[in-house]
Image (cartoon, rainbow, N blue to C red):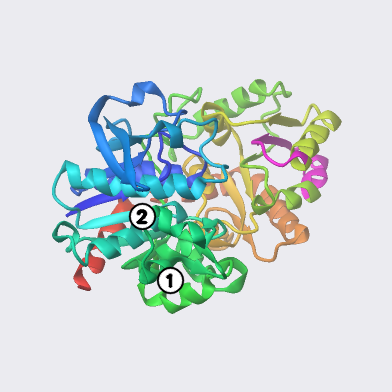
Amino acid sequence: MRVAVISAEAVPYSKTGGLGDVAGALPKALKQIGVDSVLVTPCYWQTKAEYLWSTAIDDLNVDWRGGVYPAKAFYSEANGSPTFLIDAPSYFHRDSIYGYREDHERFAFFNHAALTLLKRIGPAPDIVHLNDWHCGFSAVELASLRRWDAYWQQTRTVFSIHNMAYQGVFGADELWKFGFGGEQERNAFLSNGAASAMKAGLLVSDTLSTVSRRYAQEIQMPENGYGLDWLTRQRSDRLVGITNGVDYEVWDPRTDPDIGAHFDEQNLEGKRECKRLLLEEFSLPVRIERPIFANITRLTAQKGIDLMMQVAGEILATGAYIISLGSGEKRYEDFWQALRDHAPDQVGIFRGYSESLAHKIEAGADIFMMPSKFEPCGLNQMYSLRYGTVPIVRAVGGLDDTVQNFDSVTGTGNGFKFGPYSADRFLERIYEALFAYADPETWRTIQRNGMEQDNSWQNAARKYVELYGWTLGRW
């Protein structure tokens, strides 16, 4: 089976969020289980030169807007899988990856260039795996190509939804510029008088997936469907949820080069040392017996920061520490700074993002807070489970799929979760976690339950292979 993954971002070449982690890890995991996989992604200004191993195609002449765009493609396997990075400076050499008025044009070009490249490098893929609204353009173009281009006739599409809230909406009068002038193509995009790349991908792709079983159900409801829940319900027979995986070559406390001591589920002594080092990192008093509550996230309303703001005082009143890594909305940044100023011996903050520091926090913290309003999958709760850092989450999306409430009677469960978006419910779980933390034997049981859970990408990749086979078998 030959699979081509197309994504607007992919680790280590580019990343703004979970999409980058998924698109970078999946092709590698597919390769490891014997699938012929290739990744196609843009070459951004932010992409490090060390990842551009060679120039694969220096004359990737892309038919575009009535002319020819002279792009080129670099080759790399820095993510562990064959990867082609499309270099189009006017579109991708910018200060940030997203956030421009013509983002729809940038990714319409990328999609067309990706299909042009695939045709240059070998046999047609059996599956083209598209990711989020940025790739809705490819879904429509491939549906059209299959009708007249023999090269693509056997290719099928899988479209993955990573976040339904972002839909790539733009003016429908621009569709003709990108080669979508036919009535059938226009209708694929049209949504409430505008064009939506997400809607197009959902409508015309052969099968749909999203990043957790729970989120596959949630996007069929108005609250999380963002105006397209009618379409996900209509296509529910072709929609599956596959929980993202974790790259255990990167996130493994037994081998992680970013942490000061290594440990595993059988011997957690190294975690105690990581905790000491983490407190020193943030210039906090080293009182190992006190729990550390941690959070690593973009500071946005989606992530439940409002709930954390409401319970922070109660957490500090217990004598615990709070450590936060992230940046985002000013009101949230200001809150964490004020909390740090109020309790400098209990609060540590880092504004921005540091991959190395994220590893140190996961290794040294005791409890990870993730009370999201919605969370298609989430990765930090799975990193936390791997590092023996017990998660407290809201039961939404992938958080609900991967975290099970601890049951003190049976000794099962790997964390704590709550339902309603309520500070009171969140605080109840915090107190439950602190009660369990006070009993070292109970706490070690919860830690081991999480650390033994298989959230590997190899496990997730096998489920994608089943989906690919099901997609091909339908035709």
Q: Secondary structure at mark 2?
A: strand
116 sits to left or right of 165: left
Residue placed most toward the observer, 200 or 408: 200
Task: Tally the marks.
Answer: 2
Numbered range of the magenta stretch: 311-330
Q: Which residue is mark 2?
A: 130
**For the point 75% across and 39% down, which residue is it?**
330
Quadrant of the drawing holding the N terminus: bottom left
Q: CA distance from mark 1 to mark 2?
A: 20 Å
For residue 287, which quarter of the picture? top right
337 sits to left or right of 8: right
Q: Secondary structure at mark 1?
A: helix
Q: Measured from the top left, where is residue 3 in percent x and y?
A: 23, 52
379 sits to left or right of 278: left
Mark 2 belongs to which amino acid? Leu
On screen, 49 above or below 164? above
Mark 1 belongs to which amino acid? Asn
Q: Measured from the top left, where is residue 152 in percent x and y?
A: 19, 59
**For the point 31% across and 68% down, which residue is it?**
206
| Label 1 or label 2, whichever comes before in sequence order | 2
Q: Which residue is mark 1?
A: 187
Residue placed most toward the observer, 277 or 257: 257
Q: Measured from the top left, where is residue 387 in percent x and y?
A: 49, 39
Q: Residues within 10 Å of mark 1 (few under 14, many from 20)?
A: some
**For the point 40% across and 53% down, which residue is it?**
178
Magenta span contains residue 79: no
